[in-house]
Amino acid sequence: MPPIPLHRATLSNGLRVLLVPDPSTPVVGVAVHVDVGFRSEPEGRTGFAHLFEHLMFQGSESLEKLAHFRVVQGSGGIFNGSTHQDYTDYFEVLPTAALERALFLEADRLRAPRLTEENLRNQVDVVKEEIRLNVLNRPYGGFPWILLPPVLYDTFPNAHNGYGDFSELEQASLDDAAAFFDTYYAPGNAQLTVLGDIDVDATMALIEKHFGDIPARPTPDRPSFAEPAPGAERRQAVPDAHAPLPALALGYRIPDPSTQLDDYLGHALLASVLANGEAARLQRRLVHDDGLVTDISASCGLMGSLDARDPDTFTITAVHPGSVDPDKVLLAVDEELDRLAANGPAADELARQSARWAAAQHHEDDRVMYRMLGLGARELLYGRAEIALELPQRLAAVTPQQVQAAAASLRSAGRAVLLVEPGGAADEQGEQE
């Protein structure tokens, strides 16, 4: 494929703009990435970043509630938003002729969302119901992204539940929402990405028209969330009344992708060598040969690869029969990591996993939404959207020695072990409800 040109600009109010013209794309995608995720929310307001994402869909300065939905869907488009560790995104994909409509919609709510007591109370209830559905009343709810961090990390930003505590969500006030918006939704704290069959100059003119008059506000300092890695194993057991089988999750710290990208990618391919596909080492050993687990997976990044700043988490998760001692599973995992740390993967084994990665990346990039969101997130997090375009080539260049070093680093550092015990008492938060 020919290189995709990236065009950058910054408006006078601080809004950063990334334009990605692609004549082969018959639609246009518009995304706003805001530099605030659940690691930035204040103590006593767990879940607030996600709650605020919901509030941003409840109308704006010029549009009543649900008007955003009707305009996008009436134009033949799709839309959504999501909250991550270090950012919140909002996006639409529409026919190219509807580009200005999408820019108006995003600018209007970035300028002034409709923050009312009615909207706040309604969305608190919506978020609570989402937590019930996805966490409290689901087997393995919150496993491992909610349950593992407080075992591996010590500080509030890294360890707390980003979905939110019911009592803290209920105590959220309109003043809290207004202060959160004023602090984090300043235009200088946001990244606008437009991808599709666009003319760069004409698109910039439309962006200036709709976003340029949003008043500039101070941009919050972005704190470091760094904390020391654990020096030893930490272990915690949690009950799950809905889980049919026991489960476990291992958490390790991984390199900072903004300063150690090659080392990070070594860990990404280590995860694939361990668990991606039936021939992967943990799949073959623990599922097929020893029958210790019914399911196993590994991933580099708590919520996806290259989706957060430092610190982030390498995870291995497994579900196993109740008759299997979890320490037998841990021992088998450690033995496979030790083998990789001693000898590394075979060249053909690594090439197979690199090819799987590249195929998955190209398949994902076929969808405008994922390509746009990947570029926008990497631009916001690391200042280089190009990382998203370089991934297949950079992964193909990872050597067996880099994967070997990644395995050795996991075995030489502390880790978190989370044990999920089925049939236990209901979650305390659920009991309160």
Image (cartoon, rainbow, N blue to C red):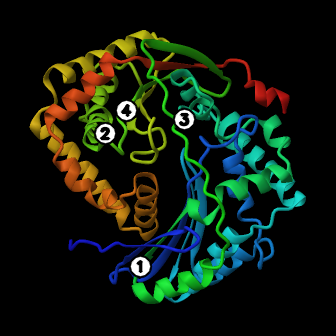
Precedes in sequence: disc 1 or disc 2 = 1
Is residue 29 shown above or below 330?
Answer: below
Query: Which element is circle 2 on?
Result: helix
Query: Which element is circle 1 on?
Result: strand
Amino acid on which disc 3 is placed: Trp
Left or right: 117 in relation to 109? right
Amino acid on which disc 4 is placed: Ile
Is residue 23 shown above or below 55?
Answer: below
Q: Could you say which disc has been placed on residue 264 in the image?
A: 2
Mark 3–mark 1 distance (CA, rounded to whole Å): 33 Å
Precedes in sequence: disc 4 or disc 2 = 4
Mark 1 — residue? 196
Precedes in sequence: disc 1 or disc 4 = 1
Amino acid on which disc 1 is placed: Gly
- Mark 4 or mark 3, which is nearer to you? 4
Mark 4 — residue? 254
